[in-house]
Protein backbone atom coordinates (compact mmCIF):
# COMPACT_ATOMS: atom_id res chain seq x y z
CA UNK A 1 0.00 0.00 0.00
CA UNK A 2 2.84 2.38 0.88
CA UNK A 3 4.58 1.60 -2.44
CA UNK A 4 1.40 2.40 -4.36
CA UNK A 5 0.98 5.70 -2.52
CA UNK A 6 4.64 6.58 -3.19
CA UNK A 7 4.15 5.91 -6.93
CA UNK A 8 1.03 8.09 -7.03
CA UNK A 9 2.71 10.96 -5.25
CA UNK A 10 5.97 10.85 -7.30
CA UNK A 11 5.05 9.68 -10.83
CA UNK A 12 8.08 11.34 -12.45
CA UNK A 13 10.47 9.40 -10.21
CA UNK A 14 8.77 6.09 -11.06
CA UNK A 15 8.91 6.83 -14.80
CA UNK A 16 12.63 7.64 -14.58
CA UNK A 17 13.28 4.37 -12.70
CA UNK A 18 11.35 2.34 -15.26
CA UNK A 19 13.18 3.97 -18.19
CA UNK A 20 16.55 3.44 -16.47
CA UNK A 21 15.78 -0.25 -15.84
CA UNK A 22 14.70 -0.72 -19.46
CA UNK A 23 17.84 0.98 -20.76
CA UNK A 24 20.06 -1.03 -18.43
CA UNK A 25 18.38 -4.28 -19.50
CA UNK A 26 18.89 -3.42 -23.17
CA UNK A 27 22.62 -2.76 -22.60
CA UNK A 28 23.02 -6.00 -20.67
CA UNK A 29 21.35 -8.03 -23.41
CA UNK A 30 23.50 -6.42 -26.12
CA UNK A 31 26.76 -7.11 -24.25
CA UNK A 32 25.89 -10.63 -23.09
CA UNK A 33 27.97 -13.35 -24.74
CA UNK A 34 25.86 -15.80 -26.73
CA UNK A 35 26.97 -19.39 -27.34
CA UNK A 36 25.03 -22.52 -28.16
CA UNK A 37 27.38 -24.55 -25.95
CA UNK A 38 28.98 -22.19 -23.41
CA UNK A 39 32.14 -23.16 -21.59
CA UNK A 40 30.75 -24.63 -18.39
CA UNK A 41 34.16 -25.61 -17.05
CA UNK A 42 33.05 -29.01 -15.78
CA UNK A 43 35.78 -30.59 -13.63
CA UNK A 44 36.26 -33.77 -15.65
CA UNK A 45 38.92 -35.22 -17.95
CA UNK A 46 38.57 -38.11 -20.41
CA UNK A 47 41.36 -40.60 -21.13
CA UNK A 48 40.77 -43.04 -24.01
CA UNK A 49 43.30 -45.85 -24.42
CA UNK A 50 43.22 -48.07 -27.54
CA UNK A 51 45.02 -51.41 -27.79
CA UNK A 52 44.04 -53.76 -30.59
CA UNK A 53 43.71 -57.45 -29.86
CA UNK A 54 42.88 -57.29 -26.14
CA UNK A 55 39.55 -58.32 -24.65
CA UNK A 56 37.89 -56.26 -21.86
CA UNK A 57 39.41 -58.35 -19.07
CA UNK A 58 42.91 -57.91 -20.46
CA UNK A 59 42.37 -54.18 -20.95
CA UNK A 60 41.36 -53.91 -17.30
CA UNK A 61 44.25 -56.00 -15.98
CA UNK A 62 47.16 -54.79 -18.13
CA UNK A 63 46.24 -51.15 -18.81
CA UNK A 64 43.37 -49.64 -16.82
CA UNK A 65 44.58 -50.85 -13.42
CA UNK A 66 47.88 -49.00 -13.80
CA UNK A 67 46.10 -45.82 -14.88
CA UNK A 68 43.68 -45.91 -11.96
CA UNK A 69 46.54 -46.47 -9.52
CA UNK A 70 48.52 -43.43 -10.71
CA UNK A 71 45.52 -41.13 -11.25
CA UNK A 72 44.89 -41.09 -7.49
CA UNK A 73 48.06 -39.00 -7.10
CA UNK A 74 46.57 -36.10 -9.10
CA UNK A 75 45.75 -33.03 -7.02
CA UNK A 76 42.02 -32.45 -6.59
CA UNK A 77 40.91 -35.86 -7.88
CA UNK A 78 37.52 -36.99 -6.53
CA UNK A 79 37.02 -40.37 -8.17
CA UNK A 80 37.76 -42.28 -11.38
CA UNK A 81 35.32 -44.20 -13.56
CA UNK A 82 36.47 -46.64 -16.24
CA UNK A 83 34.91 -48.84 -18.89
CA UNK A 84 36.78 -51.49 -20.88
CA UNK A 85 35.59 -52.90 -24.19
CA UNK A 86 37.18 -54.93 -26.97
CA UNK A 87 40.43 -53.17 -27.89
CA UNK A 88 39.78 -49.92 -26.00
CA UNK A 89 39.29 -48.45 -22.55
CA UNK A 90 37.63 -45.18 -21.53
CA UNK A 91 38.42 -43.51 -18.20
CA UNK A 92 36.70 -40.44 -16.79
CA UNK A 93 38.42 -38.46 -14.04
CA UNK A 94 36.17 -36.36 -11.78
CA UNK A 95 37.64 -33.47 -9.81
CA UNK A 96 36.42 -31.23 -7.00
CA UNK A 97 34.68 -28.00 -8.13
CA UNK A 98 37.52 -25.64 -7.11
CA UNK A 99 40.27 -27.61 -8.85
CA UNK A 100 42.60 -25.83 -11.27
CA UNK A 101 41.81 -27.85 -14.41
CA UNK A 102 44.86 -26.63 -16.33
CA UNK A 103 47.11 -28.00 -13.62
CA UNK A 104 45.01 -31.17 -13.39
CA UNK A 105 45.35 -31.73 -17.13
CA UNK A 106 49.12 -31.30 -16.97
CA UNK A 107 49.36 -33.77 -14.08
CA UNK A 108 47.14 -36.24 -15.94
CA UNK A 109 49.49 -36.19 -18.92
CA UNK A 110 52.49 -36.70 -16.62
CA UNK A 111 50.96 -39.67 -14.81
CA UNK A 112 49.79 -41.19 -18.10
CA UNK A 113 53.39 -41.20 -19.30
CA UNK A 114 54.51 -42.74 -16.01
CA UNK A 115 51.83 -45.44 -16.19
CA UNK A 116 52.84 -46.51 -19.70
CA UNK A 117 56.20 -47.70 -18.35
CA UNK A 118 54.37 -50.62 -16.68
CA UNK A 119 52.28 -51.58 -19.73
CA UNK A 120 52.86 -54.14 -22.48
CA UNK A 121 55.17 -53.25 -25.39
CA UNK A 122 53.44 -51.51 -28.25
CA UNK A 123 51.05 -49.48 -26.07
CA UNK A 124 50.27 -46.28 -27.96
CA UNK A 125 49.68 -42.95 -26.17
CA UNK A 126 46.05 -42.43 -25.16
CA UNK A 127 43.72 -39.59 -26.13
CA UNK A 128 43.39 -37.04 -23.31
CA UNK A 129 40.78 -34.26 -23.42
CA UNK A 130 38.87 -32.02 -21.05
CA UNK A 131 35.12 -32.37 -20.89
CA UNK A 132 33.02 -29.29 -21.64
CA UNK A 133 29.80 -28.53 -23.47
CA UNK A 134 31.72 -27.36 -26.54
CA UNK A 135 33.17 -30.83 -27.07
CA UNK A 136 29.79 -32.57 -27.11
CA UNK A 137 28.86 -33.63 -30.66
CA UNK A 138 25.86 -31.84 -32.13
CA UNK A 139 24.99 -34.74 -34.38
CA UNK A 140 25.96 -38.15 -35.68
CA UNK A 141 26.28 -39.23 -39.30
CA UNK A 142 25.42 -42.91 -39.76
CA UNK A 143 26.44 -44.87 -42.86
CA UNK A 144 24.84 -48.06 -44.11
CA UNK A 145 24.86 -49.92 -47.40
CA UNK A 146 23.45 -53.11 -48.81
CA UNK A 147 26.11 -53.48 -51.50
CA UNK A 148 29.31 -52.49 -49.69
CA UNK A 149 31.09 -54.23 -46.85
CA UNK A 150 31.66 -52.69 -43.44
CA UNK A 151 35.35 -52.17 -44.23
CA UNK A 152 34.53 -50.29 -47.45
CA UNK A 153 32.05 -48.07 -45.62
CA UNK A 154 34.65 -47.24 -42.99
CA UNK A 155 37.24 -46.34 -45.64
CA UNK A 156 34.77 -44.06 -47.43
CA UNK A 157 33.82 -42.33 -44.18
CA UNK A 158 37.47 -41.89 -43.17
CA UNK A 159 39.06 -40.83 -46.45
CA UNK A 160 36.17 -39.23 -48.35
CA UNK A 161 33.56 -37.84 -45.96
CA UNK A 162 35.69 -36.81 -42.99
CA UNK A 163 37.98 -34.43 -44.99
CA UNK A 164 34.86 -32.65 -46.28
CA UNK A 165 33.68 -31.85 -42.73
CA UNK A 166 37.19 -30.95 -41.54
CA UNK A 167 37.35 -28.17 -44.14
CA UNK A 168 34.27 -26.44 -42.67
CA UNK A 169 35.31 -23.54 -40.34
CA UNK A 170 34.57 -24.22 -36.68
CA UNK A 171 33.76 -27.89 -37.23
CA UNK A 172 35.76 -30.72 -35.69
CA UNK A 173 35.24 -34.06 -37.42
CA UNK A 174 36.53 -36.98 -35.33
CA UNK A 175 37.48 -40.23 -37.03
CA UNK A 176 34.63 -42.68 -37.65
CA UNK A 177 34.04 -45.56 -35.27
CA UNK A 178 32.12 -48.79 -35.46
CA UNK A 179 33.98 -50.34 -38.39
CA UNK A 180 35.98 -53.53 -38.32
CA UNK A 181 39.75 -53.64 -38.67
CA UNK A 182 41.37 -56.80 -39.97
CA UNK A 183 43.32 -58.55 -37.22
CA UNK A 184 45.42 -61.71 -37.43
CA UNK A 185 45.78 -63.58 -34.14
CA UNK A 186 48.60 -66.10 -33.73
CA UNK A 187 47.76 -68.82 -31.22
CA UNK A 188 50.82 -70.57 -29.87
CA UNK A 189 50.75 -74.11 -28.47
CA UNK A 190 52.46 -74.10 -25.03
CA UNK A 191 53.42 -77.77 -25.28
CA UNK A 192 55.21 -77.24 -28.60
CA UNK A 193 57.04 -74.24 -27.15
CA UNK A 194 58.28 -76.34 -24.24
CA UNK A 195 59.33 -79.09 -26.63
CA UNK A 196 61.55 -76.65 -28.56
CA UNK A 197 62.70 -74.86 -25.40
CA UNK A 198 61.30 -71.52 -26.58
CA UNK A 199 59.46 -68.64 -24.93
CA UNK A 200 56.47 -66.63 -26.21
CA UNK A 201 58.69 -63.54 -26.43
CA UNK A 202 60.71 -65.23 -29.17
CA UNK A 203 57.56 -65.73 -31.23
CA UNK A 204 56.48 -62.12 -30.73
CA UNK A 205 59.91 -60.82 -31.70
CA UNK A 206 60.06 -63.05 -34.78
CA UNK A 207 56.63 -61.91 -36.00
CA UNK A 208 57.55 -58.27 -35.41
CA UNK A 209 60.91 -58.40 -37.21
CA UNK A 210 59.80 -60.79 -39.95
CA UNK A 211 56.91 -58.63 -41.11
CA UNK A 212 58.31 -55.15 -41.65
CA UNK A 213 59.61 -52.74 -44.27
CA UNK A 214 62.82 -50.80 -43.65
CA UNK A 215 65.37 -48.95 -45.82
CA UNK A 216 68.66 -50.72 -46.45
CA UNK A 217 70.50 -48.11 -48.51
CA UNK A 218 71.13 -47.30 -52.15
CA UNK A 219 72.58 -49.36 -55.00
CA UNK A 220 74.34 -47.42 -57.73
CA UNK A 221 74.08 -48.99 -61.17
CA UNK A 222 75.54 -46.87 -63.91
CA UNK A 223 74.23 -43.33 -63.65
CA UNK A 224 71.31 -44.26 -61.43
CA UNK A 225 71.05 -44.81 -57.67
CA UNK A 226 68.26 -47.19 -56.74
CA UNK A 227 66.60 -47.47 -53.33
CA UNK A 228 66.93 -50.96 -51.87
CA UNK A 229 64.49 -51.46 -49.00
CA UNK A 230 64.27 -54.68 -47.05
CA UNK A 231 60.68 -55.73 -47.64
CA UNK A 232 59.58 -58.72 -45.56
CA UNK A 233 55.91 -57.77 -45.34
CA UNK A 234 53.74 -60.83 -45.90
CA UNK A 235 51.13 -60.58 -48.63
CA UNK A 236 48.89 -63.39 -47.39
CA UNK A 237 48.40 -65.23 -44.15
CA UNK A 238 49.90 -68.47 -45.46
CA UNK A 239 53.32 -66.82 -45.62
CA UNK A 240 53.27 -66.37 -41.84
CA UNK A 241 53.41 -70.14 -41.40
CA UNK A 242 56.89 -70.22 -42.99
CA UNK A 243 58.22 -67.38 -40.81
CA UNK A 244 61.45 -68.58 -39.12
CA UNK A 245 61.45 -68.13 -35.35
CA UNK A 246 64.79 -69.70 -34.39
CA UNK A 247 67.86 -70.00 -36.58
CA UNK A 248 71.14 -71.61 -35.69
CA UNK A 249 73.11 -74.80 -35.72
CA UNK A 250 70.04 -76.89 -34.96
CA UNK A 251 66.94 -77.32 -37.08
CA UNK A 252 65.12 -74.14 -38.07
CA UNK A 253 61.87 -73.63 -36.17
CA UNK A 254 59.04 -72.04 -38.15
CA UNK A 255 55.86 -70.45 -36.89
CA UNK A 256 53.78 -73.37 -38.14
CA UNK A 257 55.79 -75.67 -35.85
CA UNK A 258 54.63 -73.97 -32.64
CA UNK A 259 51.30 -72.36 -33.53
Image: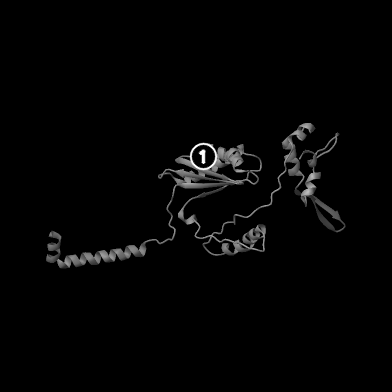
Q: Residue at x 21, y 66 (%)?
A: 16
Position of 46 with respect to 25 (left or right) is right
Q: Quadrant of residue 244?
A: top right
Point out the image quarter for the C terminus: top right
Pick the front one: 82 or 94: 82
Q: Is residue 226 visible to us here?
A: yes
Point out the image quarter for the N terminus: bottom left
Q: Is residue 244 visible to us here?
A: no
| 80, above or below 182, in the image | above
Number of numbered labels in the structure image: 1
Mark 1, residue position: 71
Which color scheme does this rendered protein use?
A: one colour
Place of residue 120 in the rendered image (x, y in percent of width and height, measured from the top left): 64, 39
Callout 1: helix, strand or loop? helix
Place of residue 26 in the rendered image (x, y in percent of width and height, measured from the top left): 31, 66
Position of 114 with respect to 246 (left or right) is left
In this view, which residue lies farthest toward the front?
A: 146
Place of residue 106 in the rendered image (x, y in percent of width and height, measured from the top left): 51, 44
Pick the front one: 194 or 11: 194
Place of residue 190 in the rendered image (x, y in percent of width and height, measured from the top left): 73, 35
| Label 1: how many Cα within 10 Å (few below 14, some 14–19, many 20+) | many
| 16, above or below 43, in the image | below
Position of 208 with respect to 17 (left or right) is right
Q: Quadrant of residue 198?
A: top right
Amino acid sequence: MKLLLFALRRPVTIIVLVVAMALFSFLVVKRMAIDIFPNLGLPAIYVAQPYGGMDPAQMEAYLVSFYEYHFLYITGIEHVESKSIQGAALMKLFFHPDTDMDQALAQTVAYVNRSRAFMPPGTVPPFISRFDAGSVPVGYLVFQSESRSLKEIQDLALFRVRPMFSAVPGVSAPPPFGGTARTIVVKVNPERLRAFGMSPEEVVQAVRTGNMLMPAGNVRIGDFAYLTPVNSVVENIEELEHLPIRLGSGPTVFLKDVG
